[in-house]
Image (cartoon, helix red, strand yellow):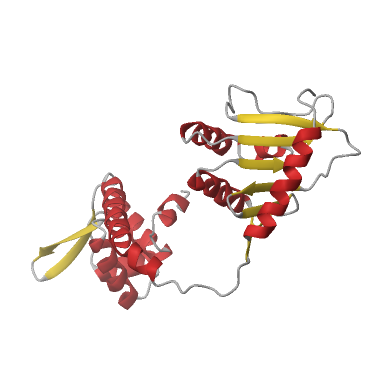
Amino acid sequence: MNTSALRKIGLSDNEIKIYLALLKSGTNTAYDIGNITGIYRAHVYDKLEQLMKKGLVTYIFKGAKKYFQATHPSKLKQYLEDKKRDIEMQEDDIDSILPELEAAIKTQKEDTFVEVFKGVEGLKYFLKDIIKTKQEVLVTGIDDQKYNETLPIFMKQYFRDLKKNKIRERVITIKRKGIFLFSKKAAPTTNYRFLEERQFNPTNTFIYENKMVIVTWGSPVTAVMIKNNEIAETYRSHFEYLWKIASSEN
């Protein structure tokens, strides 16, 4: 049996062994469970205690002896529901103290902040940040095909959120036959303009609010976010110059 699903919900290897042994054999003493699973008896008691807390094992007395038994496998779903409720309560607790935590952040003397994000989650992070700012985003050197292949579902959500928040996106890309572009239906608030290859800088940049993000498609993909008013304004001014000379037709 593939037990990876049980590990993913938080059961240890020994807990899985004990739980499966009880499902197959019915009621057993801790001594018998130790013999069946090969787990040292002191550890058996500890794991049985953990399984009982999760609602996956119960016990009965037969005479003076305690016998353990696994609950019905459907209890696994209930265990997950209980975990979800716990997480929701923890989120509420964190939400209640977030204002105080944010207020406690010391103001930095430096006016430039640099963050580096690696992998697909890094891409998602700054794209979500764009939505949070609710301000126009300027993009150059983009290869839409890579975003479409790497984040097929997320990009649909990204464009949906751009539209929902009335965020305008302007993109300057290379003038080339057959280049992949997101359709107007998929990205209704995105406008494209095109530059000849000799004018085109292939560096993928995003400019929004007071931030500039550079994306490099290495292994893994890396996003470098620079937060600085002057740098953002410099890149924004350069973008506007390119936008004026770029063609609206590919």
Residue 119 located left or right of residue 32: right
| In the depicted structure, whether residue 249 falls above or below residue 243 | above
Residue 115 located left or right of residue 36: right
**Figure quadrant of residue 97:** bottom left
How many badges with numbers are in the image? Answer: 0
Q: Nearer the viewer, residue 127 or 107?
A: 107
Q: Nearer the viewer, residue 179 or 61?
A: 179
Q: Quadrant of the C terminus?
A: top right
Question: Which x, y percent locates residue 139?
Answer: 69, 41
Q: Nearer the viewer, residue 185 or 3?
A: 185
Residue beneath the point at 73% across and 43% down: 239
Residue 198 located left or right of residue 180: right
Residue beneath the point at 28% across and 66% down: 50
- Residue extending farthest to the bottom is 42
- Is residue 42 among the parts visible in the rendering? yes
Q: Nearer the viewer, residue 36 or 4?
A: 4
Question: Which x, y percent locates residue 168?
Answer: 58, 35
- Residue extending farthest to the right is 198
Residue beneath the point at 23% across and 62% down: 52
Residue beneath the point at 80% across and 32% down: 246
- Is residue 215 among the parts visible in the rendering? no
